Image (cartoon, rainbow, N blue to C red):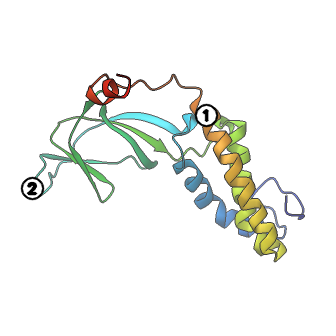
Amino acid sequence: MLGGAPFSSFEEPKPHVRIAANLYPTVRDDVLRLHNWNCATDRVILAPMANPPAFDFAHQFQLPGDWLRTLQVGRKGEPLEYRSERQRLLANVTALPLVYCFRNTVEDTWSTNLIRVVELAMAAEMAYAVTSSTSVRDSYRDQFARLLKVAKAIDGQDDPPEEFAEGSFVESRFS
């Protein structure tokens, strides 16, 4: 995309491959954190750690090693009080349901839109180092931002629409 020789592995001895190899894990994780991508969402029930927190909560739970962002704590429609501290969740339950964004390193499971978004993010990150042009870098940043909106919308359309519980706020809106 930036005019250099294409490569298919971060191990190839070609110019700029080392830059790409160093940037890729961070760019990948940053893009995965930007949205609750269907291909990077997982559900687990966490067991409490042996040592409880010092006060306020009865148990603490270690976040999974591939955790990037918390999407839901507790079961849908049954929120629970919790606190996030030091890669752990603190709560007053003995089993903690968690929906989270995980570090999906299996690109074959990604949608084509997500792949394209990561490609543009990488191009934007590498553009100045490869081309020494701020305008090329800015162009890729703009393309990335535009495609990210589209990719998030398409990915979100795979899920059913979110319904809001009836209550005084909803009822007052349509009265």
Indicate the position of residue 90 as horizontal and vertical percent values.
22, 49
Quadrant of the rendering where the N terminus is positioned = bottom right
Report which quarter residue 162 is drawn in.
top left
| Residue depicted at 90% across the width and 64% down the height | 3
Using residue 38 as the reference point, say whether residue 124 is left or right of it.
Answer: right
Secondary structure of residue under mark 1: helix
Residue in front for this viewpoint, 46 or 162: 162
Judging by the rendered image, the residue that carries numbered circle 1 is: 155
Relative to 65, residue 164 above or below: above
Quadrant of the rendering where the C terminus is positioned = top left
Judging by the rendered image, the residue that carries numbered circle 2 is: 55
Q: CA distance from mark 1 to mark 2?
A: 41 Å
Using residue 45 as the reference point, say whether residue 49 is left or right of it.
Answer: left
Residue 86 visible to an observer of this rendering: yes
Q: Which amino acid does the dot numbered 1 rest on?
A: Asp
Q: Which amino acid does the dot numbered 2 rest on?
A: Phe
Indicate the position of residue 50 as horizontal and vertical percent values.
18, 48
| Residue depicted at 72% across the width and 58% down the height | 142
Circle 2 crowding by C-alpha within 10 Å: few under 14, some 14–19, many from 20: few
Using residue 18 as the reference point, say whether residue 27 is left or right of it.
Answer: left
Relative to 99, residue 51 above or below: below
Indicate the position of residue 143 as horizontal and vertical percent values.
75, 54
Q: Specify the farthest residue to the left.
A: 55
Circle 1 crowding by C-alpha within 10 Å: few under 14, some 14–19, many from 20: some
Relative to 36, residue 117 above or below: below
